[in-house]
Amino acid sequence: MTPFLARHRWWLTRTLALPLHIAVFASAAFFLVRLVPGDPVMARVDASGGFTPEDYARAAEQMGLAGSTWEQFGRFWSELIILDLGTSPVTGRPVWEEVMSRLPSTIELVTVGLFGAVVLALLLALITLSTRSQRLHAVLRGYGKLAGSVPDFAVAILGLVLFFVVLQVIPAPLGRVDPRMALPDVTGFPLLDSVITGRWEVFRAIVARYVLPLSVLVLVHTPSLWRQLSLGLSEQVAAPPTLFKVASGATRLSVYLSVLRRASASSVVMLGAMFGGLIGGVVVIEELFGFGGVGQFAITSVEQLDFVGLQGFLVVVAGLCLLVFFLVDLVNMILDPRRRPGVRVDG
Amino acid sequence: MSEVLVAVPIPSAMTPRRGASAWRTWLPALPFAVLVLLTIVARWVVPFDPETVVAPANLAPDGIHPFGTDSTGMDVFSRTIAATRINLVMAVLVTMMATAIGLVLGLVLGMNEAAGGVRGLFGRGMTRFTDLTDAVPPLIVGVVAVGLFGPSLVSLSVALALILMPNQVRLTRAEVLKVRGDAYVDAARMAGLFPWQVMVRHVLPNSARPAIENSSNIFGVSIIVSASLGFLGVGLNPPTPEWGVMISSGISDVMLGGWWTTLFPALALCVAVSSAALLTGVITRLTRAPGH
């Protein structure tokens, strides 16, 4: 191996593994959909007035279920390479377009929510590092215990009852903006688009409707992150590298940064897992507030027995999650070089 | 089984305080016990039939209907209590299946990973694969399972158990890898025990703890997912009382000021999930208590 390859092996191998992982998943999604008991084609064919084999063949063709399983598999892959996920027999539109028209708004909601959670968790970490009050530490530990034990949409309902019904300070949960307002569409990310086009009244309307769902996401999902981070902090705060930093007269900020850097690996993994979970899980919040995101497409596909749509949705969501896991691994290997494969650690 | 064998330091917050009486250990388990009891007796203790119209629609909470009535005139209190049945039974099924399969698979993978040849290859391949299953959010799996196999309790439970299992596999496997090289395992092997005897009698009891502690987490997640599916309208069918369905059918009432049809099932959901979370502490204490 040349020195160049040896030096960059850690990210090269991980990058090469990504398409492989996605391929495994896409194939798994394909076969999963074919596992359906019974004949899904029959569910589509209108059998009430009798049907001919030609009707059946046409329905099978529409659903992407014509030919043997291996022929279908070949077709699936040759189309997937060029990002063609087939055409939904229900809406008549390409599945890729259907998913991509809904995905950005979900990604935006989840990203902003998780960004808030990261900021709050870092703030809590800063408080823990800079104060010695046992009572405060106990309160923060208690907050960490809420991790995973509060369903976000139930909290959102409590919030709706309080702020919409009783106090009447937030707009009705009937969509991202006022129904009379048109959403600008440049990139598909609603907040970003309203900023790009300079439509500040739209931006304000979205923010007003995002306040409650985002606060719920931040409050409910910070504890998981915070618990991981505080575990790491308690391990690292008095570890030899920290003592060395303090003893060598480093500034307080640089000591904090060094502790955080060593303590954050498992929280970064947690963050990635939360992002994946929320891309699917936030659908309940989206439905509750009438936002409509990528999860809604999955629900409609299930209701309409649209297997092409379901399969395409699975491939895209799994691909996105694998991409995030990939980024998580890279970030962790950058934060902590000891995590790179092939690096020997003494002791 | 001596605790010395397990190579995990006991965090100070987790060890029971000296002189802590039994009831203090068991108190956090009380809400969960009440819920389980309710699940069993729900049908007989509710004041009204949860699946029939018993009063005028949209009554606000009062003495007779403590949680009010919903838009069809069914008693919200009775329905909220009766719903424990579906939501909790499913969560119990999922937790038991996920933990049982997770323990077995984790044990087998952990023991075979370092082996040469096909066995080791299979072990490492499966480990990789369990890592990959993380890429599908549990709720999506639920939606897909209902879509493909229909809204049945069994298919939903199996699908969720399969997707939540990898966590248990990972936890068990990590522990097995630690325990595997311990002296008593070697001693058992040299004493002439069959490999499966070593696995079941010596490695399993010493590596099951993390997965068992995590089972209350799985319980919480499965309650949330089952209620979410009900809310999204792809769960089990109404008028079967189920918290998610009740919340979604009540949400339009909220706009008109009828907060009770949604709020009470939502609260019940929170209580159920947090009671499982409280259980985590109890399980942790039990599995870590010296000389139990």
Image (cartoon, coloured by chain):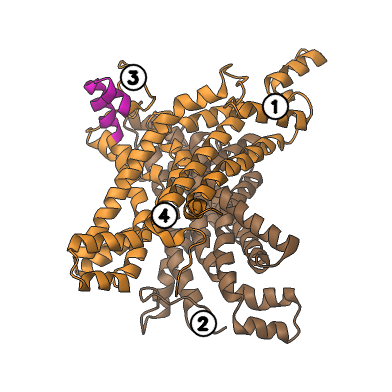
Chain colours: A orange, B brown
Residue B269 in view here = no
Q: Is residue B226 left or right of residue B31?
A: right
Kindly indicate whether the residues beneath marks 1 and 4 are on one polypeptide chain.
yes
SS state under label 2: helix
- Image quarter of residue B21: bottom left
The count of marks equals: 4
Say which of marks 2 and 4 sits in front: 4
Cα distance in 3D space between marks 2 and 3: 62 Å
Cα distance in 3D space between marks 4 and 3: 38 Å
The residue indicated by pointer 1 is: A75
Sooner in the amino-acid sequence: mark 3 or mark 1: 1
Which residue: 22% across, 61% down?
A254
Neighbour tally class for label 3: few under 14, some 14-19, many 20 plus, Cα within 10 Å: some
Sooner in the amino-acid sequence: mark 4 or mark 3: 3
Neighbour tally class for label 2: few under 14, some 14-19, many 20 plus, Cα within 10 Å: some
Instruction: Give the magenta part as a residue range.
Output: A192-210
Q: Is A209 contained in the magenta span?
A: yes
The residue indicated by pointer 4 is: A332
Query: What label does residue A183 carry, if any?
Result: 3
- The x, y position of residue A246, in whole percent, is 21, 70
Quadrant in which the N terminus of chain A appears = bottom right
Q: Amino acid at mark 3?
A: Leu
Cα distance in 3D space between marks 2 and 1: 57 Å
SS state under label 4: helix
The residue indicated by pointer 2 is: B3
Neighbour tally class for label 4: few under 14, some 14-19, many 20 plus, Cα within 10 Å: many
